[in-house]
Amino acid sequence: MTNSSYRKDRVGGIVIVAVFVALVMGMLGLWTKIRHDVNTPIEIHLLTSDPKQAADGEVNSENTEGIVISADISKHWQNNPDTPLQTYGAQYDLVVYDNSGYDLVNWSVVLNIPERNITLDSYWNGEWVYDKQSDIIMFTPDDRIETITAGDYGTFGAIMISRELMDITEVTFTGSRYKPITKYWLFWLILILFVVWITSVVAYILYLNREKNHRRIAEKLNNVIDQTMRTFANFIDTKDKGDTKGHSSRVAYYSQKIAEKLGMSEEEIRDIGYIGLMHDCGKLATPGGILGKPGKLSAEEFNVMRFHTTNGGKILDDFTEIKGIKDGALYHHERYDGKGYMEGLKGEEIPLVARIIGVADALDAMSHDRCYRKHLDRETILSELETNKGTQFDPKIAQIVIDMINSGEIFV
């Protein structure tokens, strides 16, 4: 090898390593940013704007984080007029405008009330609690407005009885921010780095092997792709704090065994292994506190968890060289009876690769320890597979797995 060739090889290797390190650092940075946004609540003290100002984005406070609240009295009346018992009844309408660029979740509002001893007659779109000692009202939204998407707004209000009509001018907003992974600029930088890295690796290997025959080159490329997939699968699995270490690789293995029994071609069997490795890639956008929670997930946490399928589909949207890789991530939690998520597909509406991945995923989940339970024994696993044929699982695929367990071809 000449000095010139040696220098080219060395430079190429340094470039590949540097891009890979940048890619890993970018993924860690993205994960940290998403976790920070979701888990770090914001608290903002605001002066209310009138409805027209708020709708136009005009605010009466600084440092609002793009959040504007308007308060208005839409109607009012007198009770016991011209008597010592005279009071005013009024409908107070409030609107939260989200111009922050994030979705607002887990939010609440505290209203400073200028009048003492008010009476809450009725309210809507949430729970109002009046603290007489502090002269504040605490509002918690119900499920109709508990999430305000970026650029949207949520309305709530109450009818209150007081000695005088009140101007609600000071409020405190508390909540968390959520943004889809594809709206982070760092995500697109990672995607570009990933393409650059893959391109660099392929180009480097082609350069090193330009004198070798086509089969040798193809073998090397397949090894690179396989190692790349396994590396990313390891990134995905390690987010679960070690509880699912090797999960993606085992799902890939079980899926290939099922594909063999279904008579798929060698290329299809190879590809479904890659699909199995990447089926949980959407968990990169799921907060670690949810993935590693030892107990049962709340309804809100489970809803966030469900989005790992949608996020996986988005991540793999442009990965078209391996047929079905997006389907494996997007639909592996659909059920054969149509009761799965996220689209409620039924039977053979679910792509075959997703039906295979779904059974393989469930088999590995049952046969290995998870943070919320120990692994199931062999007989329980067989019973679960048999019971859920035609409901959760494709009956043909479930039976193939049952037969392989009974024959010893798959050990659980």
Image: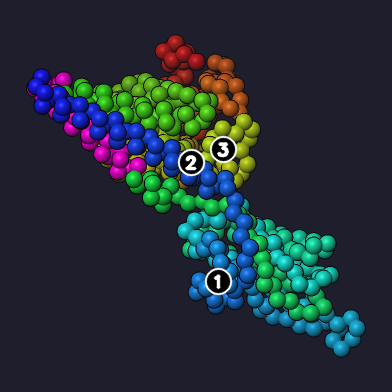
Label 3 sits on a secondary structure element that is helix
- Asked whether residue 198 is drawn in magenta, I would say yes
Q: Point out the frontmost of discs 3 and 1.
A: 1
Image mark for residue 32: 2
Q: Position of residue 74 (x, y in %)?
A: 66, 79
Q: Position of residue 141 (x, y in %)?
A: 65, 58
The one of 168 and 80 positioned closer to us in this rendering? 168
Q: Nearest the camera: 7 or 194?
A: 7
| The residue stretch that appears in magenta | 190-216
Image quadrant in which you'd find residue 377: top right
Q: Which of marks 2 and 3 precedes in the sequence?
A: 2
User: For numbered disc 2, what is the local secondary structure?
Assistant: helix
For the residues labelled 2 and 1, the Cα–Cα distance comes to 31 Å
Query: What's the residue at 41%, 13% (across, down)?
Result: 409
Q: Is residue 166 left or right of residue 45?
A: right
- Residue 100: x %, y % from top left: 50, 60
Give the x, y percent position of residue 204: 19, 29
Q: Which mark is drawn over residue 290?
A: 3
Q: Which residue is mark 1?
A: 59
- Residue 320 is one of the magenta-drawn residues: no
Residue 306 seen in the figure: no
Tags 2 and 1 in contact by the CB under 8 Å rule?
Answer: no
Task: Using the image as rendered, state which of residue 353 and residue 317 is in the foreground.
Answer: 317
